[in-house]
Amino acid sequence: MKACGVVVEYNPFHNGHHLHVTQSRKVTDCDVIIAVMSGNFLQRGEPALCPKQERAEMALRSGVDIVFELPYHFAVQHASIFAEGAVKLLDGAGCDSICFGSENGKIEPFTHQLKLETEHQEDLQHTIREQTKLGKSYPAAAAESYRLLFSHSSDLDLSKPNNMLGYQYITAVDRFSNMIPYTIQRTASDYHDESLHKSFISSATSIRKKIFEDGLQEIVHHVPESSYAVMEDFTKDGQFLNWNHFWPYLQHMLTTSSPLALRAYYEVEEGIEYRLIDAAMTSTCFESFMQQVKTKRYTWTRIQRMLTHLITKTTKEDIQQNTHPTYLRMLGMTAKGREYLNKYKKDFPLPIISNLNQQHKDLCAIDIRASKAYAMGFSDSAKRKEMLAKDFTAPPVIIQ
């Protein structure tokens, strides 16, 4: 059986994701689609709209066969570490190929760009250092460096988020895997579009925005029926989350912690802890706090990731001690996915964890802590209690 891997967040699973899964199966001629999916906190430092179990179910009801969780220490990271962790997991799950979305749907510009970078690595790193000295964030410095060095010899526009992330997948595959890379063209909405698209293939950003502004019913045509049903069922006793729900928790932590204590957490550096404390003392909501803290060097995304590490109590030491995936955390599978695992799991270099128990507590400690922090966003005490225990009580989602 051939397996194709996809790296996803499904926040939530929408029509564009369904197209990606369908096209990935077609272009790779695979038997199963294996998704590595971020958990309850996402790459841009945001809490997921709804828990990882519900998002896994959406995927499994719309064409994905197996969902593994991307561990927190890879999921809430800048693009290169995020991609490296995901690629290593897909490789460990026996994937023959990986398929991602991009602007023009052609793999050649990515492989050509990789060749150029390999040949000019020293010049690239020097240019990035020079750009950061000008006060640019690392992503902005990298994008400008690629433009300066390669714009005349490359057809790949790395200012586009899908292309930049796809390029990180290509780089990670080149370093760590023998998977064959494929890409399909992004359709309709851009990654950051905030308005729903008339084609009903809308960005996850616009879908989340519409849900919080006008309610779930307004996005019914922009997600598969099964996704809508899962979300509708979840809201019967739960609520969708964003950073606003964590503001009291975050403000309390910042206003009662010393600068020295904050410096222990991952990505808190260069004195930003003083700025965080000062802003927390005077801000009335998450939005006003972020407006006070962000700078040209500290982008909105970089700050959100930092804050996520604070509320999950993820230290620099935690990240330094977890540089390689050590397990495959099963969130769910279909009957076809079960068939694949029964046939090949004995050959996997990583153990599969389907149900957390005492033995796995240390191995998955950071993910468990992140889930507990996520539970703090729920205002209903019964739902919060359920979420605090969910890592241990919720079995993998099985779709027959």
Image (tube, helix red, strand yellow):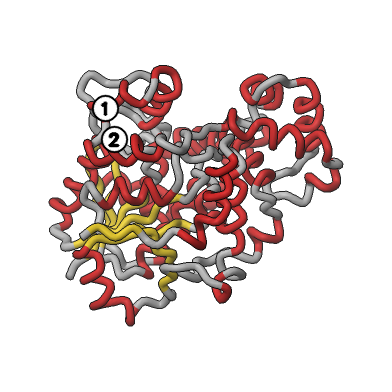
**For residue 118, above or below residue 196:** below
Q: Are marks 2 and 1 in contact (CB under 8 Å)?
A: yes
Q: Residue most toward the bottom? A: 346
Mark 2 burial class by Cα count in 10 Å: few <14, some 14-19, many 20+:
many
In the rendered structure, the answer to whether residue 7 lies left or right of residue 339 reads right
**Image location (x, y in percent) of residue 160:** 39, 33
* Disc 2: which residue: 228
**For residue 148, above or below residue 108:** above
Q: Residue at x 57, y 44 (%)?
A: 384
- Amino acid beneath label 1: Val
The Cα atoms of the two marked residues, 2 and 1, are separated by 6 Å
Instruction: Count the numbered circles shown.
Output: 2
Decide which of 300, 106 is in the foreground and name it: 300
Q: Is residue 173 visible?
A: no
**Image location (x, y in percent) of residue 15:** 24, 35
Q: Quadrant of residue 303?
A: top right
* Disc 1: which residue: 220
**Image location (x, y in percent) of residue 234:** 39, 40
Mark 1 burial class by Cα count in 10 Å: few <14, some 14-19, many 20+:
some
Q: Is residue 392 visible?
A: yes
**For residue 395, above or below residue 142:** below
Question: Which quadrant is the N terminus positioned in?
Answer: bottom left
Q: Quadrant of residue 368?
A: bottom right
